[in-house]
Structure formats: C-alpha cells, structure tokens
Image: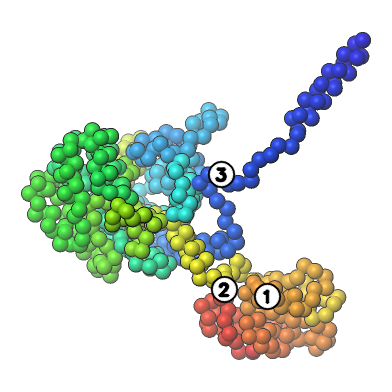
Amino acid sequence: MQVTEEVEKLLQLKAQIADDVQPHKFVLKCPKGTRDYNPQQMAIREGVFNTIIKCFKRHGAETIDTPVFELKETLTGKYGEDSKLIYDLKDQGGELLSLRYDLTVPFARYLAMNKIANIKRYHIAKVYRRDNPAMTKGRFREFYQCDFDIAGQYDSMIPDAECVKIVAEILTSLDLGEYKIKVNHRKLLDGMFAACGVPDDKFRTICSTVDKLDKTFWEDVRAEMVDEKGLNPEAADRIGHYVKFQGGMESVELLLKDETIQKQKSAVEGLEDLKLLLVYCELYGIADKVMFDLSLARGLDYYTGVIYEAVLQGYTNKPSAKEEESVSVGSVAGGGRYDGLVGMFDPRGKMVPCVGVSIGIERVFSILEQRVLASNAKIRTTETEVFVVSAQKNLLEERMKLCKELWDADIKTEQSYKRNPKPLDQFQYCENNGIPLAVIIGQSEIQEGVVKLRVVATRKECVVPRNTMVEEIKKELAQLSRDTTGINNPQTAGGKCC
C-alpha cells in the first residue's frame, strides 16, 4: 500500500514537471521603443560616429565612460517634469538604482566625485527614457547620445560659442541639408517670466510648457499653462507676445530697449550674454546658421545660461497651419550651460561651471537611413581590402599561407571557407561585397614565385613577385584610395601595377 502511494506521488510529480516544461508560444520581437540594426544600418551608424568623434577630437576632447545605471538619488530632481520618464530598476542588494536618462548628470556626478575642476570631454553611450516612442522620427526608449562638454571657470561665452561651432561643423560634415541653430538664455527666460507676472514657483513648470512650442501651436501651449498649470490668462498672453521674438542681433537689441524687460536684471544679463555669443559666432563664420529664438526653452531643470538647439530646415517640427501634419524628426542637437549641477553633488556645494552639447544620433541616423533607401545606394558592411582566390583545386594550404602573410602585414583579407571553391564564385563574392583587390594563385604562379593581382572593379590584372606582394598591394590600395572617395567605394581607377 505504501509503495503504491509513493508511486502515485512520483507520477503526479512527473506530470507537474512535464506541464512546466511544455513549450509555450511567444512573440519574437524587440521591446517597445528599441530595435535591432542590420550590418548595412550599422555601417551608416559607424560612419556617423566616426564623423562626430573626429570633430570632438579636433577640438581637443578626451573621453570617459560611466555606468549604465546610477543610484536613483543621483538622478532624482535633475530633470523637472521629465523625471517621470526615468527607468527605475528593482531593488538589488540594498541599492535603489535607475537607468541613466542622459550623459550630463552622470558627468556632473563624475566631476564632483573625482574633484575635477577642468576637463573637456566627449562621451558616446546609450541612455534610457520611458517615453512614448516614435520610431520613424528617431525617438526611442533606448538610444545613443553623443555628448561634448567643457567644464571649468572661463571667460564668458568663449566655451559656449565653441559648442555652437561644433554643432555647425558636425551637421555640415554629415551633409544633412540646411539647418539652423536656435539660441536662447535661461536668465532671459526667467526675467521674461517675471516681467509677465509668472510666480517664481511656476518658472520651471511654465518653462517646460513653453518648450513644447516647436512641436505644437501657441493655442495648445497657452491652454496648458492656464487650464492645467493655473497661470493667470493675462500672464500667458504676455508670454505669447515675447516668445514670437526671433532673429539675429537686431532682435536682441530690440529686447534690450523693451522697458518691461529692462526692469529685470536677469533678463538684461541674458541678453548681454547672447550679444557676445552672436559676435563670437560671427568670428567663427557660423552667424548665418545661428538664430536667436525666445520660444526656445529646453525643459531640463539644470540649465542656467545659454541654451541652444539645432533643427534641420527641411524637417522642421512646427507646422504652419493646423491642417498640416508634422513630418519632422525634431531637433538633431541641443545643449546649454549648467553651472549649478556639479555643486548639487559636491558635499561643500563647490560649483564647477559647465557647458555642453548633445548630438541626437538616432534622429540623424533616421534621416540618413531613409536617404540610402530612397537612392538604392549599396553600403559596404566590411572593410575587406583583399580576397585571396585559388584558380585551381587543392590550393587551400597555399591560400592560408597567403592570408597569414597579408594579415601579418595588417592588410584586411578574406578567403573562401570552402576547400575547393569555384573561381567564378570567388570573384562574384568580391564584386558583391565591394572588395577592391583579389590576389590570385594557381600552380603556375606557385612554381614561378608570383601572384596575380586583380583590380575587381576593372578586372585588370598584373603579375607581381611573391616577395614584393605586400608592398605592391599597399601601393595599389593607396592609389585606389586617392582615385576614389575611399576604399569603401572603389570605382574604375587602377593603381601603378594594374
């Protein structure tokens, strides 16, 4: 009887285990607001990253890295109304953690923790926001930011102007079309709010609402300020008068003469800073790209001075009429001065003035990806320079020797993974993948101590001695690079030997 009961228990346990391991259906998909990138897309991204890093380094920046998650208290209270978009992590090991929302707050924590008072740094890494994604417009929940920041006590507007110059250099290099870099000043905004009758405790929340003007209409912004945030309608109307100011130096001068603005010390200080910034932008040759815009607010709480945002002219967010649909990808770069952020982390409240810019890489990539799709352009996904081809069977070992010799010479080389591949298949692989050169070996070449060198695009061939092969290949690659836009896009030009 006892044996029967034990057997019954075992059978029940077996059935339970079987139920637990039953295969279940699930959907293969990326989490909402994220995506995979194929080799063609990654090749485009890598090219964009290289352009941006080259610019950052040209301006003397060094790089750092920080953890992908921070203590929750590090991020709390730094982003205003956007704090609701922070991803909180489950308590692990007694620490409350959150995924980083941007790279600026971790940078400020890094400066305070390491007692750094001066640094010019760039940082390219992923950040996370629990936002409503708009994938076609380049707005994700997981995305890269490319940040450049200058920390230190320097004379007014000199580092700020360089950050604006960097934005202009990058957008020009990426050839994204016409763009404008809108500039404003937090002190001017605060002074304007005070002049319009906004209570001090509503400055930041009203600023977050004004920041939506590039995405929606004034009527909607006014309704949010009055109906949702309790602002006096007369104050909202006065704000509506001022946020229409935009242009160049003449607009700044006009505001300086405004009697209401003149009574606000912070507003006058902001305008004087903007005048100096525009003078420096003129010296840097980018005045035609820079525009003062009093509607630019940038909702993050930590900004204290100049703020700026770059918008592509062909992709502007702001519709001209209510009937029109917005077809934009939004701003592609933004930043500003944040002199008080490091002091929030320092035990003694030591201030380290900072100014920086962030490039919206995902939005840039969305534009470039669409452009490539529209043009049907072929994108190389590898940088292979040479493909070793066997003209006959049973030459795998010889091909391996050649590959080893070329790899040792730091030449990017491939070969077929078949023991006896067909010559036509090997040449087809070269053409399909844009490999510029093929090194061909057969029995006669082995006996004579030579190899054939073929320019894949033209199919021109020449014979070179085996002992000078590496030197001749490097000459040919250099010539091809000079004759075209680079090895990644070989055309019909040939080098010295071919």
> Which of the two discs, 1 and 2, labels the residue nearer the N terminus?
1
| Front position in the image: 421 or 480 | 421
Query: In the rendered image, is residue 351 in sight?
Result: no
- Rendered location of residue 156, percent (x, y): 23, 55
Badge 3: residue crowd in 10 Å (few <14, some 14–19, many ≥20)? few
Q: Secondary structure at mark 1?
A: helix
Circle 3 is placed at which residue position? 31
Q: Badge 1, how many Cα within 10 Å: few under 14, some, many 20+? A: many
Name which of mark 2 and mark 3 comes first in the sequence: 3
Q: Which residue is mark 1?
A: 430
Point out residue 44 in the picture as x, y percentages from the top left corner.
52, 64
The structure's colour scheme is: rainbow
Report the residue at 24% width, 55% height from top: 293
Percent position (x, y) of residue 340?
Answer: 30, 42
Q: Which residue is mark 2?
A: 488
Position of 166 relative to 460 (above/below): above
Residue drawn at the location 44% of the way across and 54% of the way down: 137
Report whether residue 130 is seen.
Answer: yes
Q: Which mark is residue 232?
A: none
Badge 3 element: loop
User: Disc 3 vs disc 1: which is toward the camera?
Assistant: 3
- The residue type indicated by label 2 comes to Asn
